[in-house]
Image (cartoon, rainbow, N blue to C red):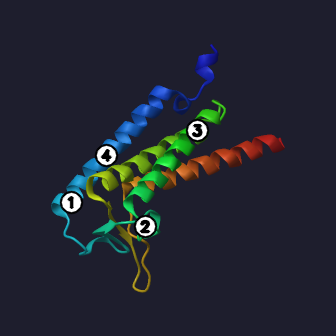
Amino acid sequence: MNEERIPLMSRPVPVIVVIVLALLLDQAVKFAVEAWLPFQEAVHVVPMLALYRTYNYGVAFSMLSGMEGWFIVTLRLFVVGFVVWLWRQTPKARGFAHAGYAFIIAGAFGNLIDRALFGYVIDYVLFYTETWSFAVFNLADSFITIGAALVILDELLLLRRAKR
């Protein structure tokens, strides 16, 4: 009876399935990008959105791009380990947080696979205007962002419940 109250994403098997499916999707899209998208040429999709294949030698938004590869891999592994630790420490009733951790882990591993295989991360999504452009990113980065948003949402819901 108590098992039914545990949210789906607070259970190990669904989390592993989500992580694996997200990794497969991320790697499939990156494979397609590498195969068919020209390097550093914008392919405009709709106004303010283009596909633009480039390589990121750092971490998010090319930060730390001058650092050695082993340092970045170690940093990413540390982050994944920390998020796994958070997932295990967070009460099982907090499904949004657990879903968020799963997405963060999937995104981190997706970029880690690129780093291990190629020495860089394949980025390909570009938002822009005539005078501004956002950093080029990929699906794994989106998973990390969605995951962080879910963790924040979970915290806000927890605060709201505490005020009642």
For marks 4 and 3, give the CA distance: 25 Å
Height in image: 76 above or below 83? below
Residue 52: percent from left, percent from top? 29, 70
Amino acid type at circle 1 is Glu
Disc 4 target residue? 25
Secondary structure under the numbered disc 4 in the rendered image: helix
Disc 1 target residue? 34
For marks 2 and 4, give the CA distance: 28 Å
Residue depth check, mark 3 versus mark 2: number of the one nearer the observer: 2
Secondary structure under the numbered disc 1 in the rendered image: helix
> Between disc 3 and disc 2, whose residue precedes?
2
Q: Residues within 10 Å of mark 2 (few under 14, many from 20)?
A: few
The answer to whether mark 3 and mark 2 are in CB contact below 8 A is: no
Furthest-bottom residue in this view: 131
Give the position of the C terminus as an image quadrant. top right
Disc 2 target residue? 67
Relative placement, left or right, of 58 versus 97 is left
Viewer-nearest residue: 63 or 10: 63
> Between disc 2 and disc 1, whose residue precedes?
1
